[in-house]
Image (tube, rainbow, N blue to C red):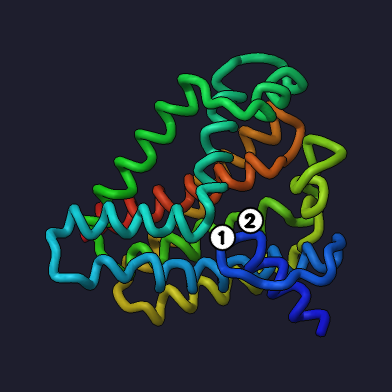
């Protein structure tokens, strides 16, 4: 039952799929974040379906990336834009966090969104279905590491405060191993290499966000998902 609480929260938080979340606390949040890569696997399998249609690769890629945004309610993209505005402002942490809380999107956010989506679509068109699946797993794997013990929240309230520090390090390593093995089963050597490369790039962003903001927020988590997704796709597309 406790495991199912985590599954429900993971699915309800990270996807548009309707579930009934009956319990929300830090213990359940830790399980949900540990299960995030599994949700990413399902999202990738579904979002990649347009790539199986008899359509030009670029069109299929655009439809797949668009479907992925719908399946996640666009929340990760919103977080990416907000973090870009906050960090791009050059303001101290408290002022940057205030900028991130605003509902509008500034120039840094717009530029980052356009660039990231263009990169994702171009890379998916080149790399294909399984690259997108792997990228979706990598994107949610970064949540495991961003919510590990020792990573603080930037605010005392909000999603970041709920999930910060809820994942134990052994669980993070076991989840990473499971994600890497899944990538190996997907097929080519490019899969595990791209997954680890994409996750590594996102963790660099996490390090920078922690330094600038003092910890994680919901926007930081969303930005990490999109960054890891894009970096994994680029790595796969560039690998021979």
Please identify the quadrant where the C terminus is shown: bottom left
Which percent across, then down, holds residue 192? 41, 68
Q: CA distance from mark 2 to mark 1?
A: 5 Å
User: Disc 2 marks which residue?
Assistant: 143
Tell me if I can see residue 80 in this picture: yes
Q: Considering the numbered disc 1 on the image, is that residue within a helix, a strand or a loop?
A: helix
Question: Which image quadrant for residue 210?
Answer: top right
Please tell me whether residue 151 is drawn above or below residue 8 in the rendered image.
Answer: above
Left or right placement of residue 88 versus residue 134 in this view: right
Task: Please name the residue shown 78% across and 36% down the image.
Answer: 154
Query: Under tag 2, what secondary structure?
Result: helix
Instruction: From the viewer's side, name the closer residue of 160 and 53.
Output: 53
Looking at the image, which is closer to me, 144 or 124?
124
Disc number for residue 59? none
Q: Which label was assigned to residue 140? A: 1
Which residue is painted at 40% across and 73% down in the image?
A: 45
Mark 1 residue crowding within 10 angstroms, few (<14) / some (14–19) / many (20+): many
- Looking at the image, can residue 192 be seen? no
- Residue occupying image coordinates x 73% and y 18%: 95
């Amino acid at each position: 039952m406790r495991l199912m609480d985590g599954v429900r929260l993971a699915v309800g938080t990270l996807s548009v799929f309707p579930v009934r979340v009956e319990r929300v606390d830090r213990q359940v949040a830790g399980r949900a974040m540990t299960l995030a890569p599994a949700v990413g696997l399902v999202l990738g399998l579904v979002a990649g379906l347009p790539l199986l249609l008899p359509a030009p690769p670029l069109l299929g890629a655009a439809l797949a990336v668009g479907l992925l945004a719908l399946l996640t309610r666009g929340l990760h993209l919103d977080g990416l834009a907000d973090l870009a505005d906050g960090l791009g402002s050059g303001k101290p942490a408290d002022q940057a966090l205030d900028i991130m809380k605003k509902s509008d999107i500034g120039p840094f956010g717009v530029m980052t969104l356009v660039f990231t989506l263009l990169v994702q679509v171009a890379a998916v068109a080149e790399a294909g279905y399984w690259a997108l699946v792997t990228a979706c797993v990598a994107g949610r794997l970064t949540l495991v590491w961003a919510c590990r013990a020792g990573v603080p929240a930037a605010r005392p309230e909000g999603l970041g405060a709920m999930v910060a520090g809820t994942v134990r390090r052994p669980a993070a390593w076991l989840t990473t191993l499971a994600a890497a093995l899944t990538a190996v089963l997907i097929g080519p050597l490019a899969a595990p290499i791209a997954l680890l490369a994409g996750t590594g790039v996102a963790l660099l962003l996490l390090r920078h966000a922690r330094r600038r903001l003092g910890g994680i927020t919901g926007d930081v988590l969303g930005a990490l998902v999109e960054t890891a997704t894009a970096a994994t796709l680029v790595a796969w597309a560039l690998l021979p």
